[in-house]
Amino acid sequence: MAYKDLRDWLAEAEKIKQLKRISGAEWDLEMGAITELIYHEGQGTPPAILFDDIPGYPKGFQTLFGATCSPERMALTMGFPSSIKTGLDLVKTYRNEIKKIKPIPPRFVDDGPILENVDRGDAVDVLKFPVPKMHELDGGRYIGTACLIITRDPDEDWVNFGAYRVMVHDEKRVAFYISPGKHGNLQRQKYFERNEPCPVAVCVGQDPLLFLASGNEVAYGLSEYDFAGGFKGEPIEVVKGEYTGIPIPAHAEIVLEGEAVPGDLQKEGPFGEWTGYYASSARPEPVIQVKNVYYRNDPILCCARPGRPPSDYSFSKCVVKSGMIWDELEKAGIPNVKGVWCHEAGGGRMFNIVSIRQSYPGHARQAAMVTSQCHAGAYLGRYVIVVDEDIDPSNSFDVLWAVASRSEPAESIEIIRRCWSGPLDPRIPVGKKGFNSRAIIDACRPYEWKDEFFPVVESSPELRSATLEKWRDTIFGRD
Ligand SMILES: Cc1cc2nc3c(=O)[nH]c(=O)nc-3n(C[C@H](O)[C@H](O)[C@H](O)COP(=O)(O)O)c2cc1C
């Protein structure tokens, strides 16, 4: 890897012109709106955005948005060749790498940059950092978005982390929202069922690779620390949290440490969500009583701004999810998968496409069912489309052409009911959230007569290249 921590990573991102510095933006709505404008209306690949000189905060107390959201920055983060320029090539590389990776547990060290400053007890003030209020209808300021909520399973002694949103209530209290079924929720539930406080560390500035591990579905029982260490090829260095004993990344920027006490709930939300709506609105959620705050000098708060896609993290989410689903398809024994793409419009969850070389009767349905229910694809999925190998799953036009021309609605669509959804599902009314259904669309040529299916009307590769050779300048001009 070309970097050790977020600071090195920023230097590398700047070298490849993937970082934009903005000075003087307000925490109250401005950083959010600027990020939205850059990601919705900017030209070319959107950069990572580093905000400094935030009014009301010391110079050097910065926020970073959109760290991983471009092919170039994904390649940098994951240690892939910089020549990779498309989402699908990233997915293919990810899938090849993941097959070779062996998890590496974290290594405890006695010291690290995160211990440069420690505020304890009365000195704790989570608002000493420029925590943004992202959108106008948000219920408050969110310190945890591109974050790691680190918990330890009380029975199985493994450490999980996930990106679960964290809303500030006051200097020492934050509420966190974890959807039912997520690993952090399962672990927290175990403490609460015994009426015990759940120890928790909230890391809100870190190596972008840790964020990728945090925000995507690593298998139950496998610590994201081990997963990320395996990816890096070396252990993640951690220090022991003073209050909880939980491992904290030694090179992190900012970490809050404390506990969630059973029954201590406070309103969380509304917060703009990745689906593009405020579907989970506001509800009472567990509060973390913050006991210690650790931070580096000139700390950088990492942020992600969910909202109507594309967002400042949706591209990276789609790449990792696609790679994970492909990996799970292979592990489930589905052969001849040629590509997987989770479309950004579906936030990496609701509109997923798999291309296969159809090899036996039922192959397409099998691939679709597994895609819709494997761990990486199950939560809040909605549509799965299976296409033949001549269709690039990341090319929306090709995918829609395959659906339009190769599927027969009466035969090609299956519905699976009572699947894993949750409060963020905008299509389920408040009070009824929990389950949703899935549509599987088999947009492959019908297996029984695929070899006799009508020829595609397009020039042969030979005719194309001969024509190009002769007519290139006339068609495309000299450059
Ligand atoms: C920026 C971002 C914000 C997220 N916010 C939440 C959230 O507030 N609650 C939640 O349950 N999942 C959220 N997720 C999804 C989880 O992080 C993801 O499902 C992850 O796999 C959960 O970890 P787990 O598999 O260990 O449960 C978010 C993901 C990202 C990338």
Image: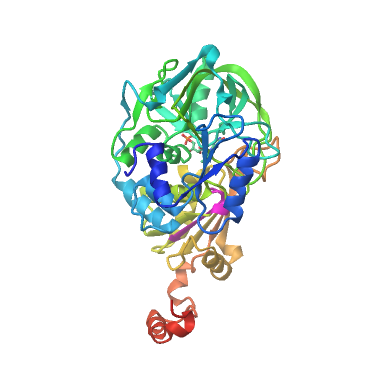
* Residue drawn at 40 percent across, 64 percent down: 357
Coloration of the structure image: rainbow
Q: Name the outermost residue toward the bottom.
A: 470
Q: Which residues are magenta?
A: 344-355
Residue 217 percent coordinates (x, y) = 46, 40
Give coordinates of residue 329: x percent, y percent: 41, 50
Q: Pick out the residue farthest to the top.
A: 122
Q: Is residue 9 left or right of residue 353?
A: left
Judge whether residue 325 can be spotted in this image: no
Residue 447 in sight from this viewpoint: yes
Q: Which residue appears at 43% of the width and 76% of the height?
A: 479
348 inside magenta stretch: yes
Counting every numbered tag in the picture gives 0
Vertical position of residue 334 compared to residue 247: above or below = below
Front residue of this view, candidates 10 and 474: 10
* Residue 377 in picture, x, y percent from top left: 49, 46
Residue 195 position in % (x across, y down):
54, 14
Nearest to the observer: residue 179 or residue 246: 246
In the rendered image, the vertical position of residue 3 relative to residue 187, given as above or below: below
Q: Is residue 101 magenta?
A: no
